[in-house]
Image (tube, rainbow, N blue to C red):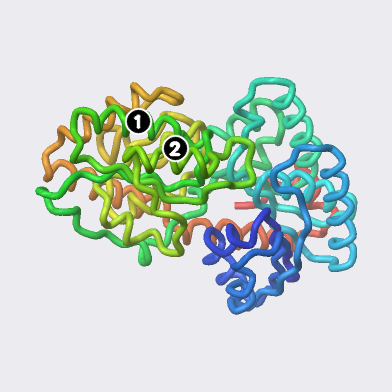
Amino acid sequence: MKIIVTANSAWSVWNFRRRLITALLADGHEITILAPTDNCVADLENLGCRFLPLSMDVKGLSSIAGIRLLYRLLRIFSRERPDAVLGYTIKNNIVGAIAAQFLRIPFIPNITGLGTAFLSGSFLLKFAELLYRIAFLHVPIVFFQNEDDLSLFVRRRLVHGLQARLLPGSGIDLTKFSPVPMPEAQTAPVFLMIARLLRDKGVSEFVEAARAISATDPSVRFQLLGQVGSQNRSAIDAETLQGWISAGIVEYLGEVDDVRPHIAAATCIVLPSYREGAPRSLMEAAAMARPVITTNVPGCRSVVDQDISGFLCEVRAAASLIAAMRRFLALRHQEREMMGRAGRLKMEREFDEEIVVEAYRNAISFIRTVPREETMLHKKLSSVD
């Protein structure tokens, strides 16, 4: 089949969908990546994909930008005539599904996160729900990365229950992210947060916790790893970050191609995010046998077993995060190791990326064997595994 994969960055496709794309290429499908150009384009092409650049406003919310994106996708889909389109990220899912619907092309979205609209509780939320309801009306399958998002979409009638399928996030490569020994007991504890530096990721709460704990235990280290200056309304600016660094509150590790050495050097991985699809950084950490601390919110809580592989804290509550960190610091070295091993076992049981690959193979097989008109009908969806 001729398949287009669309997302808001080539980087995200390369880093989060590589195993799936490799499997689909091995199955004999022709894969075209449709995304804004960045430094991962060559990697995707070397993998065997064709790349088409997509001009889009990643950050903005204007209706004009949305109409322009719809026009571009209509032109591209009309010219390419794919047998299926796999969508990731919010704008590519919504606008891509609408464009595909016009042309009667099967579109399979993956809800990797709900974005700031679902955190606002305002008119923006109602508008986002309306767009999802329209866009996903006739898609054959909608993949979700956590049970909370799936239930929300079904409950609010944004999708039909027969369309919804649950995945273990993007899955995790259990060979690449293999267990490593915990740092020696006598070394200073290191709390590491891996994420784009956004307020919605809980960066401010992490920094506040670092400030409070350092005041009583200056040996504990706090590290941030991830993109600064992202095209996002909640992005932390470089000047603010530099102020934290200059004050000795946090260490900034920048952006890296391989997070594994930094996870291996850390004692605990922290993500105080306000909401996630399925947080990749926590999955990678758990696969490497590192305990995690994260918020009790959709997406995050699905990756950790409370008091077994890590701790949950309240969202937007630095005091709760501080309490969870202090609780972790009070653990003995052996207890931290046991927590890390429990996280690894959870990843092996529930988050192997081969589960994701098989789910997409089943979905593509359904599209391939059922007439295109019938993939639009809910009554036919129950035949999909």
Residue 144, percent across and down? Answer: 58, 43
Residue on which disc 1 sits:
312
Label 2 residue SS: loop
Q: Is residue 147 in view from this perspective?
A: no
Q: Is residue 71 left or right of residue 345?
A: right
Which sits in the foreground, 333 or 374? 333
Nearer the observer, 278 or 54: 54
Figure check: 257 above or below 195: below
Q: Residue 183 at what x, y percent from top left?
A: 18, 54
* 10 Å crowding of disc 1: few (<14), some (14-19), many (20+): many
**Does 360 sit left or right of 372 as displayed?**
left
Q: Position of residue 114 (x, y in %)?
A: 62, 37
Secondary structure at numbered mark 1? strand
Query: Is 4 on the left-hand or right-hand side of 75?
Result: left
Vertical side of 337 occupied by 211: above or below:
above
Quarter occupied by residue 377: top right
Which of the 4 quarters of the picture holds residue 315? top left
Please rate how many residues cluster around mark 2, counting C-alpha atoms within 10 Å: few if below 14, some from 14 to 19, many from 20. many
Q: Is residue 38 left or right of residue 73?
A: left
Going 53% across and 34% down the picture, which residue do you hit?
Answer: 200
Query: What percent of the width, then of the height, locates residue 285?
Result: 34, 51
Q: Residue at x 46, y 57 (%)?
A: 255
Instruction: Determine which residue is flagged by label 2.
Output: 300
Which residue does the image show at 28% across and 41% down from the upper left?
Answer: 309
- Type of amino acid under label 2: Cys
Q: For marks 2 and 1, give the CA distance.
A: 9 Å
State yes or no: discs 2 and 1 in contact (Cβ < 8 Å): yes
Instruction: Name the amino acid, label 1.
Output: Leu
